[in-house]
Image (cartoon, helix red, strand yellow):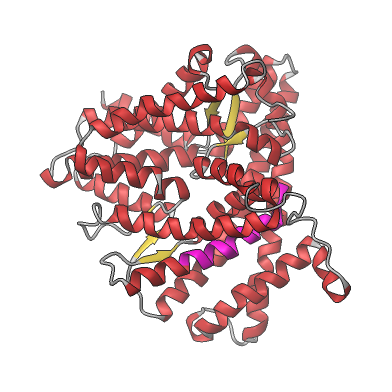
Amino acid sequence: MDWFLDFFLGFINKFLGQAPLLLGTVVFIGYMLLGKKWYTSLGGFIKTYVGFKILQVGTGGLVGTFRPIIEALTAKFGITALVIDPYYGQTSATEMLDTVSSLQYVGYVMIIAFILNIFYVGFRKYTKIRTLFITGHIMYQQSAVLLWALYWVLEGAMGVAVTWPVVIVSGLLIGTYWAVASNLIIEATNEVTDGAGFTIGHQQMFGSWIAYKIAGKIGDKEKGVDHMEFPGWLSILNDNIVANVLIMTIFVGTIMFIVGPSNFAYDDTKYFFVTYVFEKTAYFAVYIAIIQMGVRMFVSELTESFQGISNKLLPGSVPAVDCAVTFGFAPNAVMFGFIFGFFGQMLAIGLLILLNSPILIIAGFIALFFDNGTLAIFAAKAGGRRAAAIIPFFSGIIQVLGSAAVLTVLVDSPLIVGWMGMFDWATLWSGTTLLTSVAGIIVPILLIPLMLVIPQLQYRRHKDTYFTTMREEL
C-alpha cells in the first residue's frame, strides 16, 4: 500500500495542489467536450496556465514587496507574537501534525472534501449546490489547518496520532464549506465581475457575501471607488495607476520612515532612502497591472471552456477560483480594503495590548491585502467607497480578535507560529474550534447539515432562475 499512498499524495500535491495546472486541464477538458479541435483546446490550456502564472507573479510580487515592511514594523518595536497569515497558519498545522506522524492525513481530508463537492454538484437537484471549488493551494491549506485545529482540541492533549473519525469529519466539513460558501457568493460575484462566469473559492466567501449584503445600508453604490472625479490639481488621482502609487507612497511610505532605513536591507550606494521607498510603493501599481493582465488572459478561457464541463459532466456547475481574479474589476477597492483593514487591525492589536492579552497578534500582509481587498470589492459594488472603507475596517478588528480567541486553545506548543487570519477563519472556523473544545466532535458534525440548509434557502428565493446560475439580476 505504500506505493499507492505515495502516488495518492503525489497526485494531490503535484496536480490538485497546482492551481495553474489544474485550471489549465479544466479548460482543456471543457474545450474538448465542446467539440473544439485538439490544438484549440491545447491553446486554451496554455493561455490559462500562463495567465494564472502571470496572476501569481502579480500576487507573489505584492506579498514579497509588502510583507517585509509589516515584519520590519513588528521588529522595530520588539514585538514577539503570533502572525495572522494563511501561510503561518499552514506552517503551524503541518508542523504540529508532523510531530504526531499524521501529516499524510491532510491529503485524505482534501480528497474526501473534493469528492464530496463533486457529489453535491452531481446531485444538485437535491443539494441545490452549483459550484466546484478548484483553488488547489487553498484546498490543501484549509484541509491542513482544520485537521490540526479539530485534532488539537479533541485529541491533542493525549499526544496520539490523528484518528480516522477526526479525518473523516474534517473532510466532510471542509468539503461542505467549499460547496456551500462558494455557492452562496455566486450572484454577488457575477455582479462584481460583470458576468465573468465564475465564483469565489477562497478564504472569505461568507465574509464577501456579508459585505455585499450590508454594503447598501452603509453607502451609495453610485459613489464608487473607481469612478471618483477630483477637481483641480487633485484630478491627477483620476488615473488609477497614479492614484495607487501616490496613496500607497503616502500610506506605506510613512510606515517605512517610522521604521527607519536601518531596518531595511537596501543598497545605500544605489538609493537614497526616499527613492528606495518610492520604488517599493510604486510596485503596488506595477503588480496590480500584472494581476489585471493575467486575469484578462485566463478568465475568458475558463468561462467559455467550463460550459463544456457544465453541459456534459456537471450540468449547471460553476468554477470557484482564487479571490485575486476579482482584483482587476475594481483595483481601487483593493487599495481601500488594504488601508482601512490595516487601521482596523492596528486598533484591535492596541486593544489586546491595553487588556494585557496573553495572545498578541502580528498583522499579516495576506489577510490585510487579499482578504480585506476582496471584501472591499464586494462592498464597493453594493455600497460604494463609503462601504469599501467601513467594512474592511471592522473586518480588520474581527480578524485580530477572532484569531486571538481561537489561539487561546491552540497555542500550547512552541511550533505554533500563527493562525489563518482571513475573515471566515476568524469567525466561522474560530467559533467552530472554540465550541468543539467545549462540546466535542458533535459541533463539527452538526455544522455539516446546518450549512446544507443555506443553498436550500437560496433556492427558495428564486426557484425559476436558480439553475441558470449567472442571472442578470439578483
Asked if the magenta segment contains residue 341, the reply would be yes
Q: Main secondary structure of the magenta part?
A: helix
Asked if the magenta segment contains residue 125, the reply would be no
Q: In which quarter of the image is residue 53?
A: top right
Q: Nearer the viewer, residue 135 or 346?
A: 346
- Check the image and report above or below for 460 versus 189: above
Q: Which residue is drawn at 80% across and 68% down?
A: 237
Q: In which quarter of the image is residue 238?
A: bottom right
- Check the image and report above or below for 387 versus 81: above
Left/right placement of residue 356 relative to residue 138 reads left
Q: Which residue is drawn at 64% across and 55% down?
A: 388
Q: Which of 155 and 50 is in front in this view?
A: 155
- Check the image and report above or below for 15 versus 88: above
Left/right placement of residue 458 relative to residue 113 reads right
Where residue 63 appears, as percent x and y from the top left, is 54, 60
The range drawn in magenta is 329-345
Outermost residue, front side: 217
Where residue 260 appears, as percent x and y from the top left, is 52, 85
Q: Residue at x 84, y 62 (%)?
A: 229
